Image (spheres, rainbow, N blue to C red):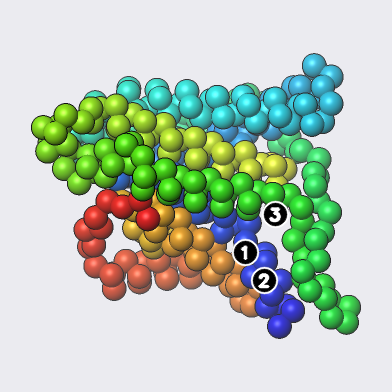
Amino acid sequence: MLYLLQQLLNGVHSAAIYALLAFGYALGNGLLRRTNLAYGGIFAFCGQTMILTAVYGWQVLWLTLPATVAFGILIALAYAGLLSRLLSRAVFAPLATRSPNAIVAATLGVLMVLSELSRIAADTHDYWLPPMLATPVVFASGGNFVATLTVIQLINTAIVVLMIVGGAAFLARSDFGRHWRATADDPFAARLCGIDTARVFHRALLYGGLCAGLAGVLAALYYGNLGFGAGLVYGLKILFITAVGGYYAPGRAALGAAAFGMAEALWAGYFPIEWRDAWMYALLAAMLVLAGDRKDAPSAV
């Protein structure tokens, strides 16, 4: 039972990262209704930007470790907002009413550009942050075995929970949330009712991009590094994972993504790790086939 508990604890952090990514993706996809491959690119680019900025602050500006990490986080989130605003106005808005393939091709190109920018900025080197807040917190013990989580895992998970719960409450009770649901349900009718659907569209994509940027920062802080190709891997993975909870309901998408993260951790603990992604993708495909083409009503939950 202690081993099972440890595997469940192992899945907590990855489940939190997946949940935050799914929440932000569904927030934008509820209005866009198109496959956005650039979302994973924002995640990886912001994680890489945080690391590179922290390295610059440490080696060039001679900042202390807390100051250089805070500097990296600030710059990464600023880039997340800038990229989201640029994409929503220059890519998504002009192509939102075109063929879905146009958005797929455009966002794939953006993903490749962001990956190459990260690689060039790092001069094709991998930079690593030192282990931070890696002190284990014991949840249970017996004999020679202890079930633990590190402090950084607990902090990251707490941040994600606060973001998702706060975001769901904001969508459920704010004017923006009501306008978002109306626009996602019928943008033409929403415009007739006096809602500025363009403003809602840009704000939703901005908030979704900030979720991706924050997830990239949290992942970089925990793992210490994000590879140049992480954008494509996470972009495709979150595209399928979000389907577990629903593409158009951010809260349910986050819960489904968290469940996927826990299942992934359990597979890694009990079955061959090299087959994990193949079987998890097969499970997602089976779920999509069995569930059929659901038309989820836009929802804050």
Of the numbered discs 3 and 2, the one sitting upstream in the chain is: 2
Label 1 element class? helix
Name above or below for residue 135 compared with residue 186: below
Q: Are marks 1 and 2 in contact (CB under 8 Å)?
A: yes
Q: Which residue is mark 3?
A: 154
Question: Disc 1 residue type?
Answer: Gly
Residue 50 visible to an observer of this rendering: yes
Q: Is residue 132 left or right of residue 295?
A: right
Residue at the limit of the structure toward the right, as seen here: 144
Residue 119 occupies which quadrant of the picture?
Answer: top right
From the top left corner, tell me how far across and down residue 66 is, in percent: 79, 31
Q: Position of residue 221 (x, y in %)?
A: 70, 42
Distance from Cα at disc 1 to Cα at disc 2: 6 Å
Vertical side of 6 occupied by 33: above or below: above
Q: Which dot marks residue 160? A: none
Q: Residue at x 56, y 52 (%)?
A: 161
Q: Quadrant of the C terminus?
A: bottom left
Instruction: State the image quarter where residue 252 is shown.
Output: bottom left
Give the alpha-carbon distance from disc 3 to disc 1, as whole Å: 12 Å
Front residue of this view, candidates 53 and 111: 53
* Residue 101 appears in the rendering: no
Residue carrying label 1? 11
Give the amino acid type for the residue marked by disc 3 in the picture. Answer: Leu
Give the foreground label among 3 and 1: 3
Q: Position of residue 284 (x, y in %)?
A: 40, 66
Along the line of sight, the residue nearer the viewer: 173 or 30: 173
Q: CA distance from mark 3 to mark 2?
A: 15 Å
